Amino acid sequence: EVVMTQSPATLSVSPGERATLSCRASQNIRNYYLAWYQQKPGQAPSLLISGASNRATGIPARFSGSGSGTEFTLTISSLQSEDFAVYYCQQYSDWPLTFGGGTKVEVK
Amino acid sequence: QVQLVESGGGVVQPGRSLRLSCAASGFTFSSYAMHWVRQTPGKGLEWVAVISYDESSQFYTDSVKGRFTISRDNSQNTLYLQMNSLRAEDTAIYYCARDPKSGYVIYNWFDPWGQGTLVTVSS
């Protein structure tokens, strides 16, 4: 199976600063088949980005995704208070569908 | 608005069975593939199974093959997960999630998710 590795596990950022989250796949992800989700405490995950860089409906432009192959990045350009959460990447290039272990973005 | 509401979780002994349900509303349920995804503190998020809009296709992660069955009742707008021979490692929050687009193609990302139902397998 495709193993997804996210780094760092925890990212401490001040509000207004930029956050860069990494997601690495153990094998090539074809056709940019990579999604990002945000999960807040006590809530289900919610979709941020699909196709590596396509924001879901209603997602602010401060969220951007990039990358290809085995290396992907989620960037939050200027962190707002509501952005402190856990972020997961997920590949849908191959079965079984797999997730990364998550990056917790916390207040510095 | 689109809503997915899971039910059926609880505490169950190892080796026993449990059936989860997911009631869908706010969209044409019969047009979308549907997934089950589970989450544990230790293993994180794990995709469990998917079923096509018309039940013609189902896929499972290896750890549940032969034990879990995904099904749906399009007349009742409800998704199911029948879980047999439960193990301690099946303990998790189980989410149902919709495939993002309607139709024959299964896109395999998840939008939206339900709020989840907790399954605890313990003697």
Image: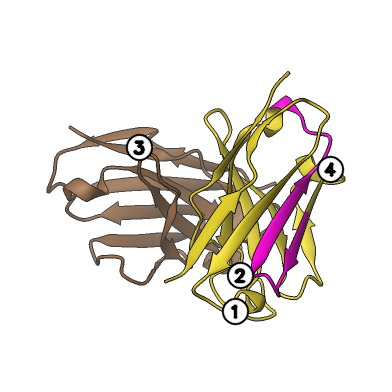
Q: Amino acid at mark 1?
A: Ser
Residue A104 - label: 3
- Location of mark 4 (residue): B67
Q: Which quadrant of the rendered structure holds the C terminus of chain B? A: top right
Quarter residue A95 falls in: bottom right
Q: CA distance from mark 2 to mark 1?
A: 9 Å
Image position of A86 with respect to A46: above or below: above
Q: Element at badge 1?
A: loop
Read off the chain for label 4.
Answer: B
Q: Which residue in the protein does label 2 denote? A: B107
Q: Amino acid at mark 3?
A: Lys
Residue at figure coordinates x 77%, y 40% from the top left: B63
Same chain for the residues at labels 2 and 1, yes or no?
yes
Give the mark nearest the N terminus, 4 or 2. 4
Q: Please tell me whether residue B84 is drawn above or below residue B47 in the rendered image.
A: above
| Residue B58, percent from left and from top | 78, 62
Q: Residue at x 71, y 25 (%)?
A: B88
Chain designation of label 1: B
For numbered disc 4, what is the local secondary structure?
Answer: loop
Q: Secondary structure at mark 3?
A: strand
Q: Secondary structure at mark 2?
A: loop
Q: Colour of chain A?
A: brown
Residue B15, percent from left and from top: 83, 29
Q: CA distance from mark 3 to mark 2?
A: 27 Å
Report which residue position mark 1 lands on. B102
